[in-house]
Image (cartoon, helix red, strand yellow):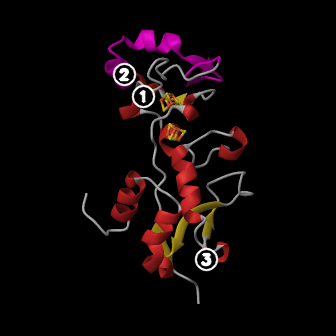
Amino acid sequence: MQPKYDVPAPCICYQCGNCCRNYFPQIHRDDLPAIAELLKKTQEAVEAILDVTAGAYHSGAPEDCCFLDPDSRKCLIHEIKPESCLLFPLGTRFGAGKVDCRGYGELKRFTEQFPEEDRKFADVFEPEFGGKGIRYIPEGEWPGLLSKAAKANVSPEFLKELLFLNGLTGA
Ligand code: SF4
Ligand code: SF4
């Protein structure tokens, strides 16, 4: 019988900015007015700091994303950041990039508490796991969920989100 996997585990962004270094997400033209409004600049001023490659806007070179505040290391457009930033590290070459992502490390430590044969892999992470990624843990492991979280030394934020995602608590 096909095992049922339906326990989602979170990958929390702690806004450390590590993935914004040497990374230039594509910016959609439709997003420019909202970015300009948020930054209190004209649309032309925003366009001027973007790099246009192959007809698409990118958030600039040479090293850090131009929307990464150099002092606070926070994203200046966090509320409306591009989809590729929202999804990070899903679908990115995370392993190859060697990005020190606290949220991903926590997710990895947590899922590693489950026997490999009980994990369900999706093809969203690459290539660190050889094209496989860890997204779900088996329903049968519910009783040990909290002790596994403790062993993985996850943050209170992770634990709260884990419980919330699985309908075990309110907001
Ligand atoms: S490296 Fe991870 S925790 Fe840091 S900003 Fe990127 S996604 Fe968030
Ligand atoms: S838009 Fe924001 S989240 Fe995306 S790479 Fe730039 S600074 Fe980071």
Q: Which residue is mark 2?
A: 33
Residue 45 in the image: state x and y as whole percent: 43, 9
Which stretch did the figure color magenta?
Answer: 34-62
Identify the residue under disc 1.
30
The answer to the question of whether label 2 and label 3 lie on touching residues, with beta carbons closer than 8 A, is: no
Location of the N terminus by quadrant is: bottom right
The reply, left or right, for residue 95 in relation to residue 165 is right
Q: Secondary structure at mark 2?
A: helix
Q: Are marks 1 and 2 in contact (CB under 8 Å)?
A: yes
- Tell me the kind of residue under disc 1: Asp
Check disc 3 and report its element: helix, strand or loop.
helix
- Give neighbour class at mark 2: few <14, some 14-19, many 20+ (Cα, 10 Å): some
Q: Earlier in the sequence, mark 1 or mark 3?
A: 1
Residue found at the far bottom of this picture: 1
- Provide the secondary structure element on which disc 1 rests: helix
Q: Which residue is mark 3?
A: 118
The three-letter code of the residue at mark 3 reads Asp
* Spot occupied by residue 44 in the image (x, y as percentages of width and height): 43, 10
